[in-house]
Image: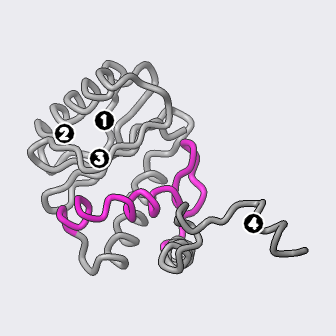
């Protein structure tokens, strides 16, 4: 199971955090600091898997990729494949690149809702639900179309009473 999905910059500022288990805000901050400490101290030529028993609990690992000024990190348990998660990170980054035309840190900061939507199409509740960048983009574009039309805007929802009255 995926326990957390994180994007942080090379200064340790979190740009996206999604925990799939309940943790207090204080504990989340501790985890973020510990993850950054581990990643920033690793050489670029080392593998992208790190045992994280002391950070997130027993039998957990950090799987990460470093792109430009960003770390893309997934915290996983032993049930997940490290190589599968590396591929998943690649799908996530490719999808972000398709969406933002060569994604950068500012894209993530200014479009965090879109980034969360993309991540939610790939991972839900700690389980991988889609591994095709093309399929994720189709689903995300459909969601964005609905949002632009206003169907998902709560201010535009009339409610069941309005629907019943309009049918009589």
Point out the frontmost of discs 1 and 4: 4
Cα separation between marks 1 and 4: 55 Å
Q: On the image, numbered disc 1 is attached to which residue? A: 50
Cα separation between marks 4 and 2: 54 Å
| Quarter of the rendering containing residue 119 | bottom left
Q: Residue at x 37, y 72 (%)?
A: 94
Q: On the image, numbered disc 3 is attached to which residue? A: 48
Cα separation between marks 2 and 3: 9 Å
Q: Secondary structure at mark 2?
A: helix
Q: Is residue 108 above or below residue 168?
A: above
Residue 2 location (% of width, % of height):
49, 40
Q: Nearer the viewer, residue 64 or 142?
A: 142
Q: On the image, numbered disc 2 is attached to which residue? A: 39
State which quarter of the image contains the N terminus: top right
Magenta highlight range: 104-133
Cα separation between marks 2 and 1: 9 Å
Q: Nearer the viewer, residue 99 or 133?
A: 99
Cα separation between marks 1 and 3: 7 Å
Mark 4 crowd level (few <14, some 14–19, many ≥20, 10 Å Cα)? few
Q: Is residue 13 left or right of residue 72?
A: left
Q: Residue at x 42, y 25 (%)?
A: 23
Mark 1 crowd level (few <14, some 14–19, many ≥20, 10 Å Cα)? some
Task: Say which label, 2 or 1, has the lower sequence index.
Answer: 2
Q: Tag on residue 12?
A: none
State which quarter of the image contains the C terminus: bottom right
Q: How many marks?
A: 4
Residue 126 location (% of width, % of height):
54, 42
Q: On the image, numbered disc 4 is attached to which residue? A: 162
Residue 134 appears in the rendering: no
Q: Are marks 2 and 1 in contact (CB under 8 Å)?
A: yes
């Amino acid at each position: 199971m995926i326990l957390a999905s994180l994007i942080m910059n090379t200064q340790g500022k979190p740009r996206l955090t999604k925990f799939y288990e309940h943790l207090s805000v204080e504990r989340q901050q501790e985890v973020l600091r510990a993850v950054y400490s581990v990643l920033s101290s690793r050489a670029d030529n080392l593998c992208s898997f790190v045992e994280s028993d002391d950070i997130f609990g027993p039998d957990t690992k950090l799987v990460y990729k470093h792109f430009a000024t960003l770390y893309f990190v997934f915290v996983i348990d032993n049930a997940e494949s490290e190589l599968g998660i590396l591929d998943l990170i690649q799908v996530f980054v490719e999808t972000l690149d398709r969406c933002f035309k060569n994604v950068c840190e500012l894209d993530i900061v200014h479009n965090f809702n879109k980034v969360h939507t993309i991540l939610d199409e790939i991972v839900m509740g700690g389980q991988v639900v889609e591994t095709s960048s093309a399929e994720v983009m189709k689903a995300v574009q459909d969601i964005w179309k609905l949002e632009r039309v206003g169907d998902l805007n709560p201010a535009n929802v009339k409610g069941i009473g309005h629907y019943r009255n309009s049918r009589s």
